[in-house]
Image (cartoon, rainbow, N blue to C red):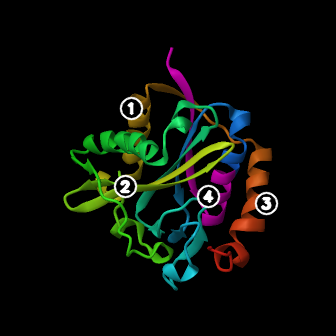
Amino acid sequence: MAEIWKLWIDGSRDPYLNMAIDELLLNRSGDCAVPVLRIYGWDRPSVSIGFVQVREAAPAENYTIVRRPTGGGVVFHDHDLTYTAVIPAGHPICRLDRTESYRVFHDAVQMALRSFGINTDLAQVEIPKHVNRAFMQCFTTPTRYDVMGDGRKFAGAAQRRTRDGILHQGSIDLDASGNDREKLTEALAEAVGRSFGIEFQKYIADAAFMDAATALATDKYATENWNIHRKTT
């Protein structure tokens, strides 16, 4: 029998709530017991910065800035499809090292992009030592196993690993689908299902979960203490 994952085709939410939902999914991954794939959007032009980055890495105007719970560089969310995979502790993916786990997810992203006639490769380079990660721009600084095609980066990701499991946050350029968010969402879900040999069941976030996520967004992700003043070293 095929492995079961949960699929949450979410809407566009504010940046603070998006990050809070992702963190809460990780923290409660043991309750769900199976991986969750969440595909979602942003309700305004937004920029997310990596966990160890400084606020000055992001633009000063016209975007709402939020710090992710994951690493990586600056990501603009005004022309992308964002997805999160939450893998509970004990799942075989958790036994992969970080770079290999990026590869298996980006194999699926490549499959999705091929459905639009886009052939890509996985980058084999590492982040140059001279690059200052505190100011790194995700889509202009390819790293190992990012999805590359025609000299540009189509998709990247960042992770956080805890005793609860893996939080994998990814971003795909909407140019890949001719700016068709719905078609890219469908292609990504289908590709993940085929690549991992799984069947999806619908994920439904209950009122208690959303209340907790809203509180986390207010108390953490919307605060200056998290987004500006958090110690990065």
Q: Nearer the viewer, residue 134 or 200?
A: 134
Task: Provide the residue designation for mark 4.
Answer: 18
Q: Secondary structure at mark 4?
A: helix
Q: In the image, 134: left or right of 23?
A: left
Tell me if mark 3 has few (under 14), some (14-19) or many (20+) residues whose alpha carbon lies within 10 angstroms of its own.
Answer: some
Q: Is residue 186 magenta?
A: no
Residue 195: give its label.
1
* Amino acid at the residue labelled 2: Ala
* Amino acid at the residue labelled 1: Ser
Residue 121 seen in the figure: yes
Query: CB of mark 4 within 8 Å of CB of mark 2?
Result: no
Tell us which disc is closer to us: 3 or 1.
1
Task: Provide the residue designation for mark 3.
Answer: 215
* Amino acid at the residue labelled 4: Asn
Q: Position of residue 80 (x, y in %)?
A: 42, 60
Point out the tag, 3 or 4, that comes first from the N-terminus: 4
* Amino acid at the residue labelled 3: Ala
Query: CB of mark 2 within 8 Å of CB of mark 3?
Result: no
- Image point 54% across, 31% down: which residue? 92
Q: Is residue 145 above or below residue 52?
A: above
How far is mark 3 from mark 1, CA to CA? 35 Å
Tell me if mark 4 has few (under 14), some (14-19) or many (20+) residues whose alpha carbon lies within 10 angstroms of its own.
Answer: many
